Image (spheres, rainbow, N blue to C red):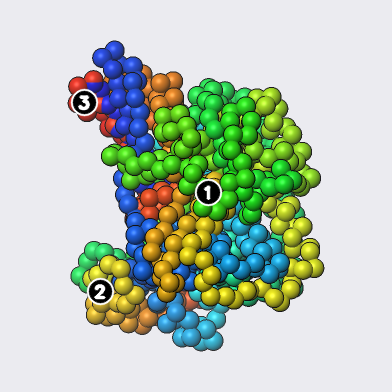
Amino acid sequence: MPTLTIDPVTRIEGHARITVQLDEQGEVQDARFHVTQVRGFEKLCEGRPFTEMPALMARICGICPTSHLLASSKACDEIMAVRIPETAEKLRRIMNLAQIIQSHALSFFYLSSPDFLLGMDSDPAERNILGVARKHPAMARDGIKLRQFGQRVLETLGGKRIHPGWIVPGGVSQPLEAAQRDQILTEIPEAIRITRATLHWFKSQIESFRAEVRSFANFPSLFLAMANDENQLAAYSGWLRFMDAKLNIVADHITGLDYQNFIGESSNDDSYLKSTYYKPLGLSAGMYRVGPLARLNMCQSLGTTQADEELAEFRELEHHSVLSSFYYHYARLIEVLFSLERMETLLRDPEILGKNVRAHASPNNFEGVGILEAPRGTLIHHYRIDQNGLIESANLVIATGHNNLAINHGVLQVARQFVKGNALEQGMLNRVEAVVRAFDPCLSCSTHAAGQMLLEISLLAADGALLDRLRR
Amino acid sequence: MQRRVLLIGYGNVLRGDDALGPMAVELLRPVLTGHVTDVELLSCHQLAPELSERLAHCELALFVDAANHGEPGTVRVQRLLPEAVDLASLTHHVQPSALLALARELYGRAPEALLVTGAGATFDGRESLSEPGREALREICRLVPQLILDFRAHRDAVAMKE
C-alpha cells in the first residue's frame, strides 16, 4: 500500500511528520500526524518544591511561557488555597492577553500569511516571511509591529519577553507603575488599527480559499473552552464547558479535579503527542477542538465593542456554529482585537496600580489544578504534592493534545481532497501542512519536545513501500 | 547618516558554550558603554524577525554566536550579506543573513554586518562554559571593540576622501 511522508512539517512550532497511506488505486486511505520528539516535563518536575513549578514550567516553551506560568501559578494558588489580590488578578489577565496577541500575531503573520498572500501553490522557496516582505511589505511590517507590541507588554510587566518570572504563586511579584501603564496605553490604538486593517483584508480573501474552507478539518466535532456566567469569552477564569457541533451544551461547570472525569488521554505508538478525548463518548467518538475557533463558537459575546461587531459577522459565515478549521485564522484576528480592547479597559481601571499584588501562604491542599485559555486553547496544569510540599505527580493537558484527534482527522480530509496519484506536488504538500498550521500546534508544549520541529511527508504504497518523500 | 552600532549576542544560556553570545554582551556592556559611543547591546535566545527594524536603523551590526564546528576556542569573523537563508522551515527564528534581507525588504536598508563566532566544545545542559569556550569568550571580548573602532576609522577615512 503506498504511503506518502511529509517530514518535517514546516512553519509550525516543533518537529513532526505526516504519513499518507494510499490504496491499490492510488486513493488516500489514511493519513497520520506524528510528533517525533519528547520533552517529558511531567516526569522531571517530580520531587521539586511546588513553588518552583511556575518558573520550571515556563521553560516548556519559548512561545507561550506566559501561559504555562499562569496555569502553573493558578494550580499553586489552589495548593496554597489563597485568593489572590484583585490587582494581581487583573495584572495576570493583562499578561494573558498580551500573550494571546503576540502568539496569534506570530501564527497569522509569520507562519500562515505566506499561504494567504503568496498562494498555496506558490514556490516554497518564496513562500515565507521574506517573500511576504517582498510582495506585501506593509502587511509584513504591520505583523512585526503587532507582535512587537505584545512582546513589549510582556517585557514591561514581566521584566523580559521570554520566560518572565513575574507571575508567582499567590499573585505577581511587582506592581505596575503608572509610567508603564501609560506607555502601553499609547501603543494600543496603533495595534487596533493594524488588527482591524488585517481583518478587513482577510475577510476580502476568504472567497479565494473556498476549497480550503471546505476541506480544512471541516467537520462536526465537540468544542471545549472555558465559560463564565456572562457567556463571554473567558480567557483567564471560569469553568470548562463542552458543546457539540450544534452548540448544545454537553457538559458544563467542570472545575478543578473534575476535569479527569471528562477528559481522557490516549497514547499512540507512532507519536509522542497524546490524544485527548471527551471521556463519556470514548476515544472513537470523543474528538473535540479547542482554541480560537472553539472559544468563538462557545461564547455569546466577547464583551468588547469592536470585537463583538466582528463576532457577529463571523457567526454569519456558516449561519450558526463555524466548523471549518480554516477559520481558526479569522478567529485569531478577532481574538487579537478583543485582547487589545480588554487590555485597554483593564489598564484604565484605577485598581491596576494597586500595590497589594501577592498573597502568601503555605500549602493547604495536596492537589491543585490551574486552568487557563492559552492562545492555542485550553491549558490544564494539575499537581499533587506530598506533606513537605514536593511534587509527587504532575499532569499537563495542552491545547495541541486536545486538538490532536481533529488535526489527524483534518490531515486525512485534506489529503483525500488534494493528494492524487503516487507522487507528491508542492501544492498538495503545502495544503496538508497548512491544515496542521491552521490549528497552530505547539509541539514543544504538548510533548514536553526538545529541539526544532520541521516537517516530512511520506507517501506509502499499499504494501508499505515508500513511494515518495518530501522534506523541509 | 546612521551612527549606531548594534551588537547582538544570541544563544541558549542553559546549553554550555551556546551561551557565548549572551555572555559576550554582558561582559562587553561595561567596556563599550561610555567608551565607544552609540553602541546598542542586545542579548537574546535566538534571532527573530522583529529585530529587522532595529537592524535597518543601525550602521553596523555585529552578531555574536557560538559555533559547533571548528577548533574549539577559536574565533572567526565573517562579513554577512543580506540573503534568504533557510526560510522554508521558518518558525519564529531566522539566520542573521536572512534578518538582513528582511531589514532591506521591509525598511529599505540593511547595515554592514559581521558575524563573530566562537567555536565551543560542549553544548549540553549546563550554565557554564568549557575551557575552550572561555578562551573563545576572552578573544571575542578583545576583538569586538577593535572591530567597531576599525569600522569607524574606515568609515571616517572614506568620508574624508569624499
B154 left or right of A316? left
Instruction: State the residue at coordinates (32%, 27%).
Output: A20
Rendered image: mark on residue A258? 1
> Are discs 2 and 1 located on one and the same chain?
no
Q: Tag 2's secondary structure? A: loop
Rendered image: mark on residue B74? 2
- In the rendered image, residue A375, in percent from the top left (x then y), is placed at 56, 49
Label 2: how many residues lie within 10 Å, few (<14), some (14-19) or many (20+)?
Answer: some
Q: Chain of mark 3?
A: A
Disc 3 to disc 1, how far (Cα)?
43 Å
Instruction: State the residue at coordinates (49%, 44%).
Output: A261
Rendered image: mark on residue A464? 3
- In the rendered image, residue B129, in percent from the top left (x then y), is placed at 30, 77
Q: Amino acid at mark 3?
A: Gly
Rendered image: mark on residue A431? none
The mark closer to the camera, 2 or 1, is 1
Instruction: State the residue at coordinates (47%, 52%).
Output: B92
Disc 2 to disc 1, how far (Cα)?
57 Å
The mark closer to the camera, 3 or 1, is 1
Q: Amino acid at mark 1?
A: Asp
The mark closer to the camera, 3 or 2, is 3
Circles 2 and 1 in contact, beta carbons < 8 Å: no
Q: Chain of mark 1?
A: A
Q: Tag 1's secondary structure? A: helix
Q: Amino acid at mark 2?
A: Thr
Q: Chain of mark 2?
A: B
Disc 3 to disc 2, how far (Cα)?
48 Å
Asked whether A454 or A272 is in front, the reply is: A272
- In the rendered image, residue A207, in percent from the top left (x then y), is placed at 62, 24
> How many numbered badges does the structure rendering display?
3
> Are discs 3 and 2 located on one and the same chain?
no
